[in-house]
């Protein structure tokens, strides 16, 4: 099946093949082509060029972009979008002045979601999660990582991961699965954290690997959750089972999680609201992608990660939504990109690169997704005509995304 898109005002995010991530100054470069066409064939980008030499389109489905722009789909490398119900009661608690840690201590937070998930069938969980998947596809996401971590028992973690597998099999976007058994210590293990970590290492991880349910292993390495030693133990067991690490680090405190992640070959370290010069130094020259989740900082009223210092130090950064019921009940990557500019002073070009190619890298998928490159999967969206690329970040609430294409076909729910 061929698809020819004509009359594109601007193709945004063109990259040569083999460019797997962008670091430091490279992040400010966004390659574009004006007045263009793009051809997809068998679900992949085949070619693009100027309208002055547009191919005939014989035998292809022809779409007229009407002068709008074409962007590579967003890649969202950090979500928890499989969950049961919602937690707006905690939203009210926050308005009344309680902190995230205080809510967690009162049995809210992750343990609240674990109780709800336990009481929800696999079928119902799938239905709820698919509604969120369709929501993010409409908002331009074409590639997503989804974590477990609201199960907190072997049975319920497997239940979550099977739901993620089913999403992967049935949804038109690309999905990567992460096992996050060490998201919090389960109710049944309160006061026995070591035994819970034993359970994660000796029972959960082997069961997850046996069923081939995860691509990555994650740990919430932070004050009040899991220590650096526990994190290292879990990610090393994960590594022995073929799962690379992606770590929640430095959200609540300078946790040591960044250094541990780099030293143990993590693909990404995520959150990073609390970062010092040592953390930035540890990341320099490493293959680990620091991933910023400004939606969580926004929703919880926390300080934002020091994106400018990181880019100035030559690091690449990725952006993701953290879509979850507690700290970021939104998977809107456009909002994330705008927040990155508004609150972290990333330029629109840097933010778009962070939310596409670098976020694909943070899922190990940047050879296939994250830019307009011949040979990559044809995941992109068309916008209404806009005066500039920057307008897309600036007019952050205007519904500019007009049509979405995944694997070379138009998405229609
Ligand atoms: O990434 N920080 C840990 N986990 C999630 C929040 C999960 C929740 O509150 O349900 C996060 O922010
Ligand atoms: Fe998270």
Image (cartoon, rainbow, N blue to C red):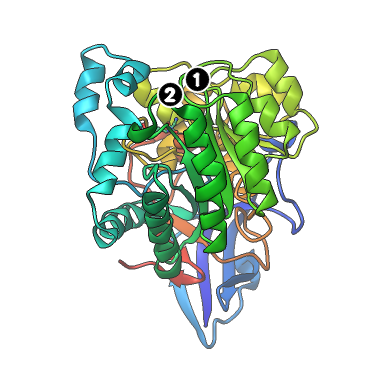
> Secondary structure beneath disc 1?
loop
User: Relative to 227, is 322 above or below?
Assistant: below
Are the residues flagged by discs 2 and 1 in contact, CB closer than 8 Å? Answer: yes
Residue corresponding to mark 1 = 304
Task: Give the answer, above or below, for where 41 lies relative to 12.
Answer: below
Residue 63 position within the rendered picture, expressed as x and y whole percent measured from the top left: 45, 72
Percent x, y of residue 39 = 58, 72
* Label 2 crowd bin: few (<14), some (14–19), many (20+), radius 10 Å: many
Above-or-below relation of 3 to 76: below
Residue at 51 percent across and 27 percent down: it is: 341
Q: CA distance from mark 2 to mark 1?
A: 6 Å
Could you tell me if residue 384 is visible in this image? Answer: no
Camera-side residue of 378 and 323: 323
Where on the picture, by quarter, is residue 234?
top right
Side of 150 where 337 appears, left or right: right
Total labels: the figure holds 2
Percent position of residue 214, x then y: 54, 55
Residue 41 placement (x, y as % from top left): 58, 77
Disc 2 residue: CB within 8 Å of ligand 1: no
Label 2 element class: helix
Q: Residues within 10 Å of mark 1 (few under 14, many from 20)?
A: many
Residue tagged by mark 2? 297
First along the sequence among labels 2 and 1: 2
């Amino acid at each position: 099946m061929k698809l020819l898109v004509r009359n594109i005002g601007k193709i945004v995010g063109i990259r040569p093949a083999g460019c797997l991530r962008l670091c430091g100054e490279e992040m400010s470069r966004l390659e574009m082509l004006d007045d263009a066409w793009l051809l997809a064939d068998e679900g992949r980008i085949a070619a693009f060029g100027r309208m002055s030499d547009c191919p005939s389109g014989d035998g292809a489905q022809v779409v007229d972009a009407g002068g709008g722009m074409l962007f590579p789909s967003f890649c969202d490398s950090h979500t928890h979008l499989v969950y049961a119900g919602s937690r707006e009661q905690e939203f009210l608690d926050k308005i009344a002045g309680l902190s995230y840690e205080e809510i967690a201590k009162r049995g809210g937070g992750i343990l609240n979601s674990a109780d709800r998930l336990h009481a929800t069938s696999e079928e119902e969980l799938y239905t709820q999660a698919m509604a969120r998947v369709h929501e993010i596809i409409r908002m331009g996401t074409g590639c997503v990582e989804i974590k477990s971590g609201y199960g907190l028992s072997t049975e319920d973690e497997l239940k979550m991961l099977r739901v993620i597998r089913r999403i992967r099999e049935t949804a038109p976007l690309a999905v990567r699965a992460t096992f996050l058994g060490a998201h919090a210590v389960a109710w049944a293990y309160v006061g026995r954290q070591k035994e819970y970590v034993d359970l994660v290492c000796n029972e959960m991880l082997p069961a997850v690997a046996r069923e081939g349910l995860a691509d990555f292993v994650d740990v919430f390495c932070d004050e009040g959750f899991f220590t650096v030693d526990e994190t290292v133990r879990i990610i090393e067991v994960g590594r022995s089972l073929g799962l690379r690490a992606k770590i929640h680090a430095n959200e609540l405190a300078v946790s040591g999680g960044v250094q541990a992640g780099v030293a143990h070959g993590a693909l990404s370290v995520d959150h990073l609201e609390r970062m010092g010069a040592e953390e930035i130094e540890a990341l320099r020259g490493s293959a680990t992608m620091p991933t910023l989740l400004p939606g969580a900082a926004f929703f919880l009223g926390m300080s934002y990660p020091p994106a400018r210092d990181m880019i100035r130090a030559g690091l690449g950064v990725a952006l993701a939504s953290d879509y979850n019921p507690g700290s970021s009940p939104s998977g809107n990557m456009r909002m994330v990109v705008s927040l990155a500019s508004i609150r972290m002073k990333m330029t629109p070009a840097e933010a778009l690169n962070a939310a596409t190619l670098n976020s694909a890298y943070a899922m190990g998928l940047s050879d296939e997704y994250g830019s307009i490159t011949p040979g990559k999967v044809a995941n992109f969206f068309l916008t209404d005509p806009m005066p500039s690329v920057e307008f897309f970040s600036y007019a952050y609430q205007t519904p500019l995304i007009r049509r979405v294409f995944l694997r070379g076909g138009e998405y229609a729910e």
